[in-house]
């Protein structure tokens, strides 16, 4: 290799290395920010609390819940679905069994297995484990969920949801 080619390659590396480091740093901070938001959101005990924490983008949100209909589109529909749960559950506690966050600093994906316990309206202890995937983007400099997909495995022989599985 000619000396001029080697010098050119070294010069390019020196010029672009800070940019690559800044991008890696931004993605690293984004991963931490998304992880922190996910932990705040799973701890929410009401729809209003989830909204006040900035969990979801009020202007661009779609939820695929494990209960019908196929999709809840828009803040009003998503709030209604969340209200339906929180209004029928007491002492809600959620925890991550597993949480993975992937981001390029512009978009983020949080995929998780979440375990919840709660007490039904009639006092019966309840629990369930869900698979959840959240897609996030930045709004006003803050990460917000714009799409959530909640699912549970289904036993193909019975067609029934398996909400009590452990990973």
Image (tube, rainbow, N blue to C red):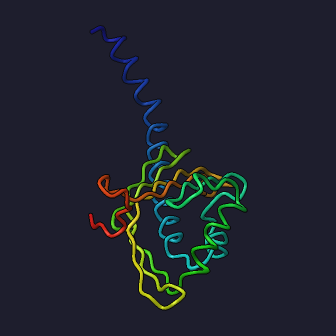
Q: Is residue 84 above or below residue 32?
A: below
Q: Is residue 90 above or below residue 149?
A: below
Check the image and name the residue furthest to the front: 158
Q: Is residue 118 above or below residue 74?
A: below
Q: Quadrant of residue 44?
A: bottom right
Nearest the viewer among 81 and 30 is 81
Give me the residue at 67% from left, 75% from top: 48
On screen, residue 79 versus residue 148, left or right, reads: right
User: Is any part of residue 109 visible from this angle?
Assistant: yes
On screen, residue 138 versus residue 37, left or right, reads: right
Check the image and name the residue furthest to the bottom: 123
Give me the residue at 58% from left, 78% from top: 86
Give me the residue at 46% from left, 82% from top: 118
Q: Quadrant of residue 5?
A: top left
Question: On the rendered image, what quadrant is the C terminus found in?
Answer: bottom left
Q: Position of residue 52 (x, y in %)?
A: 67, 72
User: Is any part of residue 143 visible from this angle?
Assistant: no
Q: Position of residue 33 (x, y in %)?
A: 51, 60
Q: Quadrant of residue 162?
A: bottom left
Q: Position of residue 93 (x, y in %)?
A: 45, 80
Question: On the rendered image, what quadrant is the N terminus found in?
Answer: top left
Q: Is residue 121 above or below residue 51?
A: below
Q: Position of residue 57 (x, y in %)?
A: 66, 57
Nearest the viewer among 120 and 58 is 120
Q: How many marks?
A: 0
Give me the residue at 67% from left, 53% from top: 73
Nearest the viewer among 66 and 38 is 66
Nearest the viewer among 164 and 13 is 164
């Amino acid at each position: 290799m000619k000396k001029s080619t080697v010098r050119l390659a070294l010069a390019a590396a020196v010029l672009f290395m800070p940019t690559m480091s800044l991008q890696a740093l931004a993605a690293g901070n984004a991963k931490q920010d998304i992880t922190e938001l996910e932990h705040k959101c799973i701890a929410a005990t009401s729809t209003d609390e989830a909204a006040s924490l900035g969990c979801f983008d009020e202007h661009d949100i779609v939820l695929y819940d494990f209960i019908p209909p196929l999709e809840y589109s828009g803040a009003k529909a998503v709030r209604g679905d969340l209200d339906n749960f929180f209004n029928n559950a007491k002492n809600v506690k959620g925890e991550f069994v597993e949480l993975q966050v992937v981001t390029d600093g512009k978009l983020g994906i949080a995929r998780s297995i979440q375990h919840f316990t709660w007490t039904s309206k009639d006092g019966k202890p309840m629990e369930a484990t869900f698979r959840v995937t959240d897609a996030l983007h930045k709004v006003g400099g803050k990460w917000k969920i714009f799409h959530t997909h909640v699912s549970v495995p289904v036993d193909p022989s019975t067609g029934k949801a398996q909400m009590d599985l452990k990973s």
